[in-house]
Amino acid sequence: MRAVVIGGGVAGLVAARRLALAGSEVVLLEAGDRVGGRVASVELAGMRVDTGAESFASRGGAVRALIDELGLGGDVQDPSGSAWVALADRTVPLPVGGLLGIPSSPLATDVHRVLDTRGSLRAYADRLLPVVKVGRYERLGPLVRGRMGDRVLERLVAPVVQNVYGADPDEVPVDAIAPGLNAAITQTGTLSGAVLRLRAAAPPGAAAQGIAGGVHRVTDALLELTRGLGVDVRTGDPALGVHPAPFGGLITVTTAREDLKVDRVVLTADGAAALDLLSDAAPDLAALPRPAASRSRAVLLLVEDARLDAAPRGTGVLRAAGRQGVRATAVTHLTAKWPWLGERAGRGRHLVRLAYRGAEEVPDAVAAADASALLGTDGLRIADRTDAVWTDSAPALAPETIAIRRALATTVLPDGLLVAGSWVAGTGLASVVASAEQAARPRAS
Ligand SMILES: Cc1cc2nc3c(=O)[nH]c(=O)nc-3n(C[C@H](O)[C@H](O)[C@H](O)COP(=O)(O)OP(=O)(O)OC[C@H]3O[C@@H](n4cnc5c(N)ncnc54)[C@H](O)[C@@H]3O)c2cc1C
């Protein structure tokens, strides 16, 4: 069997390797000049550091299984410590035991520290309010606001949802961001009870883990093994069209160099590119309204300051909307979060990653002030710096992307054409890897 995999992000690499292992002759087409997509790294102060994904969710088990297969299982690490939230007047640890910031115990001390007495009591009202018996909760924002009040939404849920998913909780469908939450609310009769139930059902251990040396080791290893299996990995060679034969048979993938006629195509290019490539195979889908692309900038700093040795803000800080005077939406204290990186950097040397919405330049003075403010340490100075700008052409939780995904679920694609990757499966390695494994499975005959 001959196959083409379009897109050399983690989804494409997983699919290409799986198809090659099953005996297919595979060409992997990557438009850019390197594979890995949104898993990427850069060298800063002699250390190779992730600029895209730097952790993976253990949910579902697909990433861990892949890591074990790649021989990297022994290098998996739990993050050291947990994150904080920057409120209007103080910066405090995020409560433990929640889901998307929704607390399971509204009166717990760590929740009270964020919400104060008024906010905690309002959140506790969730235990007294009846739940909807007919229909379901549609959007996350109104659900949280209605059951637990504004403070839970603004101080806990919005910082998590905006920073981790780049989405506005008022727009996000509950079922898209928290599958199973609606059912758990019906079963338990409260939102906090539902959170508790979903957390109890999750596998034990840290929800997100990393790898000593960085998550980019996964895509590096995949590339090496994929090449070793004979996959023809072509960078700088985008797919320009995908044309199924009118009555079944081989699919033609056009590139600038040649037309490839194959039995199977796995399309993992990011959202907008994938939809363009579906214009022949699924014209109705390709014609649906597209979401606005979302851009972000990651600013990676080397800071030489022994005051950070004590990890004053745990693994980092999410900024709540009420916090003025800071442009970054979050900071990750990488050398505090990942033991391997802390050891590599040594005492007094710290790597800090600031996240900004949009691609706009961030002057050094702004980055240094943001790092100082969020990490609660005055006058931090930048010893070295590198930036990465990211574009997501189909943010997974944008209403248009959700509509496209729904339409895709009811669209019959031509035999042999499969789709995978974050635009169909959702953001994050857990969803992406599982979708690629699924798309590369042998066809039922
Ligand atoms: C800053 C940042 C931090 C993140 N942090 C985390 C994290 O900590 N944990 C986590 O789980 N996830 C994280 N993510 C999300 C995660 O990185 C992505 O969900 C995942 O890497 C997407 O993989 P993918 O293969 O679906 O898509 P991509 O990585 O986008 O790959 C798609 C590839 O297709 C290529 N392409 C496009 N058009 C064509 C064409 N016509 N022909 C050929 N190739 C084409 C693109 O060049 C690209 O390389 C983060 C993302 C970013 C940007």
Image (cartoon, rainbow, N blue to C red):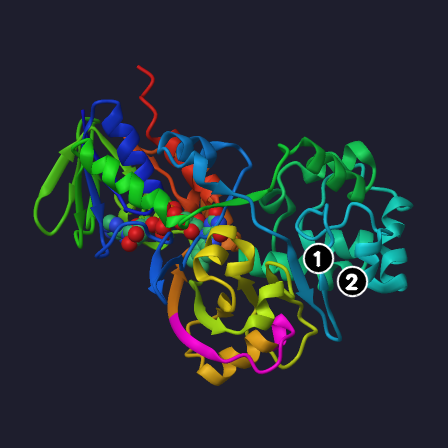
Q: Are marks 1 and 2 in contact (CB under 8 Å)?
A: yes
Q: Position of residue 193 (x, y in %)?
A: 80, 39
Question: At 68% from the left edge and 31% from the top edge, which residue is drawn?
Answer: 201
Closer to us: 287 or 212: 212
Please name the residue shown 44% across and 40% down the image. 75
- Tell me how far mark 1 sits from mark 2, CA to CA: 8 Å
Identity, as a three-letter code, of the amino acid under mark 2: Val
The C terminus: image quadrant: top left
The residue closer to the viewer here, 312 or 371, is 312
Residue type at mark 1: give it.
Leu
Span shown in magenta: 373-386
User: Is 383 a magenta residue?
Assistant: yes
Q: Which residue is mark 2?
A: 114
| Residue found farthest to the left | 257
Residue at (69, 36) in percent of width and height? 198
In the rendered structure, the answer to whether residue 392 lies left or right of residue 85 reads left
Q: Is mark 1 within 8 Å of ligand 1?
A: no
**Residue 24 sits inside the magenta stretch:** no
Residue 363 coordinates in the image, percent (x, y): 44, 83
Q: In which image quadrant can residue 189 be found?
A: top right
- Residue 137's image quarter? top right
Q: Is residue 433 left or right of residue 23?
A: right
Secondary structure of the residue carrying numbered label 2: helix
Image point 42% across, 72% down: which residue? 359
For mark 1, what is the residue? 94
